[in-house]
Amino acid sequence: MYLCSGKLLEVNCLPKPLPKKYNFVMITPKHILLIGDNSQAGNWGCQSTTASLKFLIQQKYPNSEITSIYWHSYRSDTPPNGWPDPRASISHKSSLRSLLRKALIKSGTYSIARTVKRSISPPALRQEGQSKDSVPQKVGEFDGAAIRMLNKEILPHELDLLKQCDSVLINGEGSIYPGSNRFARYPLFLMYVIKQYLKKPCSMVNHTVEVEDKEVESMIRLVYPLLDYVAVREPCSKRELERIGIKREIAVVPDALFAYQSDEDWIPTSALKQEIDFGKPYICLGDSSGLQRVSWNIPRVYTELIQRLQEICGQVILIDGNSKYSKVLGDLVKQLGVGYITVKNCSYIDLYHVFAKSELYISGRWHPSILCAKAGTPFVLWGANSHKSEGLQELFNYPSAVFDLAIIPELMEDMILEAKKIFTLRKEYGELLYRKSSNYAKQAHHNIKFHQD
């Protein structure tokens, strides 16, 4: 079961096709492995895009079954039996741990209990699956590592899942960007094993590609020609793959999130009503996936931004996309007395409607900007941890600049002027985004393919 459009849907889906060079014959897949299932990540984009991909698979292959490799495996090696089930039993255990922790803190014995626990826990248990990295660092190590994997010396859980499936779909969002390291190496290595050794249909879809690492470039040059289908989600990435030297056909297909269908009977939760006065106009100010790279003073710049935006529209709501600076932003909104929206008090389904009622959204966030566009609300884009903001602007042919995240303080005046202009022309900008989003919703199903047309 998974959540889409505010409803629980049954997941009985999954495909299997082969490329033209093998005298392609359409075969309906029975068991798809989705690599890059981000439904468990604490991020609106991760959750919504995975739900949308599963929805699209279900539409195209209603009699197939999906299994997943989750985002945890991009960080470190999967335990042999997989990651713990995150559903009800785990939530119950988490609640019990939380209650116990509060009781220990109240009694003043929490630090002592934590020290005792660490002293009696075996190091192997404490570290299992948390930091091990068996994925090869260099392209020349791929074949040796593949043999070790086939012998179950490394990544045994992945091998078991690959053997059980008949087709593989890789959700490439957030994988290949400057500094991505294992997040890029992990799927690239698995793709190589799937195509070179296991000979199964495999597609890399729904992704942005921007590379600064020459070794990752070499991996891409080795792996991408082997794949049955490749789809990037914006045109900058197509040009990047051409720069790297990929000669094969690359499809530009809008993000799976464009297929999301909103629930029109939405009513704001009490938690949202505490943060937003829906009876008054408001502007949403967000963050960026590249925020951790900036050198400017985040609290000071955000304070100035909020105060300047309040001159345009009295109510400003801070939309926190969940980053290492969430605590900083949380403390800031308390000081300034503005509304604060996070993954803790707002689902991506709620976020769509928050944007629909907003006058404007300012951020460097890819997926929230798509939800905003689908809702017919204009945005002002900042840069991100890759060229995806520029790609989104080009995708919409959007008549506004992408503001360089590294120098936001220097661009403050220009950005405020841009916000004022778009605020005044909200209807025109919003209609442009809504219209193009509706077209992209019809194209998003092209992410679910296992062969070139």
Image (tube, grey):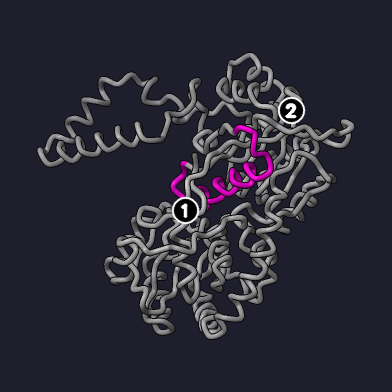
Q: Is residue 55 magenta?
A: yes
Left or right relative to 89: residue 358: right
Residue 6 is marked as: 1
Residue under the point 50% across and 27% down: 132
Where does the image place residue 154, in percent across and percent down from the top left?
58, 20
Where does the image place residue 330, in percent across and percent down from the top left?
33, 60
Q: Is 72 drawn above or below residue 308 in the view shown?
A: above
Q: In which quarter of the image is residue 153?
A: top right
Residue under the point 58% across and 67% down: 373
What segment is highlighted magenta in the picture? 40-65
Q: Gap in Å between the C-alphas at discs 2 and 1?
A: 34 Å
Left or right relative to 247: residue 36: left
Determine which residue is flagged by label 2.
Answer: 200
Q: Which SS type dominates the magenta stretch?
A: helix
Are there few (<14), some (14-19), or many (20+) residues within 10 Å of tag 2?
many
307 or 443, which lies in front?
443
Residue 307 is marked as: none
13 or 385, which lies in front?
13
